[in-house]
Amino acid sequence: MACTTILVGKKATFDGSTLVARTEDSPSGIFNAKKFRVVHPQEQPKTYKAVISHVEIPLPSNPMRYTCMPNAIEDEGIWGCYGVNEKNISMSATETLTSNERVLGADPLVYYVPKTETEDEKVGGIGEEDMVTLVLPYINSAREGVFRLGELLEKYGTYEMNGIAFQDENEIWWLETIGGHHWIARRVPDDSYVIMPNQLGLDHFDLDDAFGDQKEFICSKDLKEFIKKYHLDLSLDGKLNPRHAFGSHSDADHTYNTPRAWILQRYFNPTTNYWDGMDAEFRPDDDDIPWSRVPEKKITVEDIKYALSHHFQGTPYDPYGKHGDDKERGKFRPIGINRNNVLGLVQIRPYMPESIKAIQWMALGSTVFNAIVPFYPNIDDTPEYVKNTSALVTTEDFYWTNRIIGALADAHFAACASHIERYQNSLQSKCTQLLNKFDEEISKEAKDYKSASVLCQKANQVIADEARKQTNDLLDKVLFTASCGMKNGFARSDA
């Protein structure tokens, strides 16, 4: 999947939470509807079989309840996307990454090969389809998530390059796969944020720590030997740069990947560097944009929603822009794109009771035209409005309503922009107000984790109802505006 990820350490956020957010974006020409569900321990399989790779993996006998955001149509498997388990541990699914020929030649990806008349079937490794299901129900910390996924990668391999985030209230870890069986992981600095487009991102790795105390770095067991055997370290000073060793620097990266890191570091650090013009310290096509940065101010949920809706506004590259050179507009791949399936953001709040510590925010469809709403993951079921998405295009669910709004508003961007902006401000403000209200009520009224779960479920229904009301109102406005702008309109009426 083509995606964009933001990771924010607890000292860089507005309230001391850890924040992990990712857009799941479909490949070109494909749109994947998503639904919000809870998986209970009895629903978790004892043996998992992947649809794409056919690999079969026995699972531990003690799964936890967890939330996820699977594909509404599971013809290619589950694709859990992101979620939170009952221990308030979160996991994102995968940011598709890039690699180079040296790595893929040394440790080839593990592809599925179907049976032929002369050869038996060869199962593949694990991929984005599988990882949330295989890992999230079994981990008690972000660090545990790194080790569990790492063991699975070493044993079964993978057929794609991926980056995965693990999160608890104290730490965020970022894992990147290297070839078929190798991987590296780094702890996000508490005072920093990370922007990850679809490109291997880590720009520094401490092998001594990874093979020692593992305070900030962890990796596959034979990574040192792997690097040495295949001459992967390209450093002149002995300091391993994973981008150089394992990553790519293609022309495609400079239109598809690096511009996304550039525009969001420009957003979070507007005065730290020169970003524009002849004196720019970083340009959209630069390969040395830092992996992590200390922001100029603390980062909020609203900042992340804006960032992951970005289409290069304020630059010559905005596809909706009206000024400047036409050749520059649409030059780079935007973050807010037509193929956004879901923006998933998990906020883990250290100051809240365990029963309501985590909040699972979501925005469905193209992020340019939607709003982000919060839900409590300590629940037994999810509201109908976000639960039963199917292949049927309907205004009865959040995903399809947002998709319709985006398609209508995109063609009439200038005329609909004020509707979208007011909707985002109104719904997000109301949801934050509701969240504050329910936080207080649940903290006072809940006697234990289970009673809090009942109250969380009721709160989620109120939030879903509000989202439905305001989203339907937006659809009405956008439909009217788009209808008035139809090319077969005519000023004169019958009178």
Image: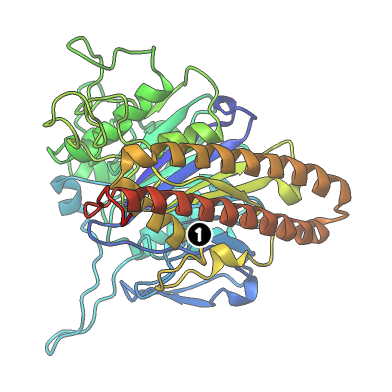
Q: Is residue 314 above or below residue 311?
A: above
Q: Residue at x 36, y 75 (%)?
A: 75
Residue name at image x 29 percent, y 12 percent:
274
| Three-letter amino acid code of the residue under disc 1 | Phe
Q: Is residue 167 above or below residue 129?
A: above
The image's colouring method is rainbow
Q: Quadrant of the N terminus?
A: bottom left
Horizontal side of residue 476 vs 332, given as left or right: right
Would residue 452 be visible to someone looking at this image?
A: yes
Residue reaching furthest top? Answer: 279
Residue 156 at what x, y percent from top left?
36, 65
Observer-nearest of 253 and 271 = 271
Front one among 155 and 43:
43
State the image quarter where residue 194 is shown: top left
Q: Name the quadrant containing residue 217.
A: top left
Q: Residue at x 61, y 72 (%)?
A: 61
Q: How many marks?
A: 1
Q: Is residue 133 above or below residue 100?
A: below
80 in relation to 277, above or below: below
User: Where residue 389 sits: x, y (%)?
Assistant: 48, 69
- Residue furthest to the front in view is 495
Residue 344: horizontal and vertical position, in percent?
49, 49
In percent of width and height, residue 422 lies at: 51, 37
As drawn, is 14 to the left or to the right of 27? right
Q: Which residue is mark 1?
A: 398
In the rendered structure, the answer to whether residue 21 lies left or right of residue 447 reads left
- Classify mark 1: helix, strand or loop: helix
Q: Can residue 94 be seen at all in this image of the molecule? A: no
